[in-house]
Every structure is written in structure tokens, then in C-alpha cells.
Amino acid sequence: MMTTPHTLAGKHIAITGGGRGLGLQMATSLVEAGARVALIDIDQALVEQAAAQLRDQGHAARGYTCNVADEASVQALFDQLKQDEPQLDGLVNNAGILRDGLLVRVKDGDIQTMTLAQWQAVIDVNLTGVFLCGREAAAWMVAGQTPGVIINISSISQAGNMGQTNYSAAKAGVTAMTVTWAKELARYGIRVAGIAPGFIETEMTGSMKPEALERVKQSVPLNRVGQPDNIARAVTFILTNDYYSGRILEVDGGLRI
């Protein structure tokens, strides 16, 4: 049986970490498809500038400031969103940070370890932040009987990556939550899925030394890093394919860590 392709026209989609990089590229693709976006970021000036940029191009966009790792901040965010919009059709949990380091390192005869602060900062933003925003979004969708979609951005580091104990643990947790939520929320018509990017050309890769970046490219079977648009298109695919849920879409050029 043929079905009508799902459209994003008029849909309200919130994106954490939406002030720059992957989040802003996702937002750009979504508004070009007719969606209304809520850009969420901890940097107020940055997110307001990003939202203004989209509005100047004729799109519907609002900017919101929030610390996703803080429960009160997240609850205040969703209270404001509910005042501004009648419903939430989608949430992309994209906000994340890096605090890389080896668990134990020997340098000049001294033993150095990953600090609790390094561990906690990444867990707070990359895992707890996803939980808090996902919880509030799901509750709003259930209350409004909205068949919404939650997309969690994981990483190929979910399998474990050297120098990223904190990041890998957080992203593995995000993957597990994604599958759990998909099972729990399906009864309400809510789909939940994840995306695990590989090496993507962002501010982080742009700051790498040329020789290090070349080694990264050589480790990818396609022999190049991905582009933000590759992830943005994955977001659009999940939002518009109503039979995709409970899975993690790996967008990594064939790389396996």
C-alpha cells in the first residue's frame, strides 16, 4: 500500500546545542523543509544570533538559553517553549562537550589520572542532559497526544574509544536510553531513535593539526571526514520515516572503532 510521504512543513522541532556546528546545520535543513525550530544553547548571544540569521532568511526560528545539565534550567526552558508553541513535534538532543584524557597516564615518571571533574562534566551534559530534555519532551508529547519524535545524538565512540572514558560511557548510555525510550513510548505514538556520527568536519576537526587530520581521514574507508549536512540529512530521514524507531543510525563513512 502506498503512503503519502511525511512532511516537516509546520512541524515544531527543538534542537539542543543549536547555536553552532551540527546543531545549526540541522536547524538550517529543517527550516528549509518548512519546519519551525527552537534553537537551544547555553551561549545566549550565540543562539540569539543563530536564530536571527534563520529569521533573516525568512524562516521560523526562536533562540533559547538553557544549561541542559541543570534540571531547573531545563524545566524553565520547557515552560517557556509551551508558552510559545502549542505542541512539540520533535526534539534533537545534540548538545555535548569533550573533556578527553587517558584514564591513567605516566608522564616524566609521574602518574596522572582522569579527574572526577573531567568525568562528571561530560556525564552531566552528554548523558544527564539528554535524560532531562528527553523526559520533558516526552511528557509534553504524551500530555498533548502528539505523535512526536525524539532523536538522540550518540557517537561511534559508544563502542569505546581510547582517551574518551567519559565520552564513550556517556554515548553508550545515550544509545541504551534511546532503545529503552523507544520501547516505553511507542504506546503513545512517539518514536525514539539515535544517530552515531563518525568524524565530522566541525570546529573540533578544524582545529586539528593537518597531519593528525590526515591520519583520521586515512582511518575512514571512504578516506574523508563527513560533513555536517550528512548528519542533518540523517535527522530529516528519521523525522520523516514513521517506521524508524529504537535504532541507532551510524553515519561514519564505514569506520568502526
Image: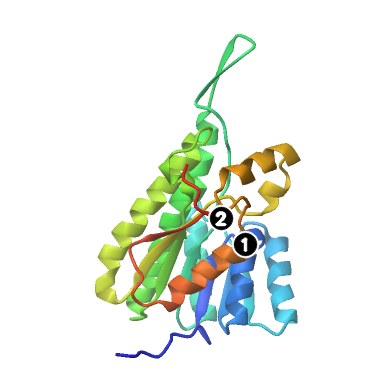
Which image quadrant: the N terminus?
bottom left
Q: Position of residue 66 (x, y in %)?
A: 57, 60
Q: How is the image coloured?
A: rainbow
> At label 1, which amino acid type do we have?
Pro
Judge the density around disc 2: few (<14), some (14-19), many (≥20) Cα neighbours within 10 Å: some
Q: Report the residue marked by disc 1.
A: 228
**Label 2 amino acid?**
Asn
Q: Position of residue 197 (x, y in %)?
A: 52, 55
Q: Is residue 76 left or right of residue 248?
A: right
The residues bearing labels 2 and 1 have C-alpha atoms spaced at a distance of: 23 Å
Residue at 55% x, 67% y: name it. 15
Image point 60% across, 9% down: which residue? 109
**Pointer 2: what residue?**
67
Q: Nearer the viewer, mark 2 or mark 1?
A: 1
* Quarter location, residue 52: bottom right
Circle 2/circle 1 CB separation < 8 Å: no
Q: Residue at x 33, y 75 (%)?
A: 243
- Of the numbered discs 2 and 1, the one sitting upstream in the chain is 2
Question: In terms of depth relative to the viewer, which is nearer, 115 or 22?
Answer: 22
220 lies above or below 65: above
Nearer the observer, 115 or 200: 200
Q: Please, what secondary structure does the residue beneath circle 1 have?
A: helix
Q: Residue at x 56, y 81 (%)?
A: 35
Where residue 207 sits in the image (x, y, percent)? 73, 45
Residue 249 seen in render: yes
| Crowd tier of the residue under label 1, counting other residues whose Cα lies within 10 Å: few below 14, some 14–19, many 20 or above | some
Q: How many marks?
A: 2
Q: Position of residue 224 (x, y in %)?
A: 63, 52
**Secondary element type, mark 2:** loop
Q: Quadrant of residue 117?
A: top right
| Image position of 146 (left or right of 26) | left
| Residue 209 seen in render | no
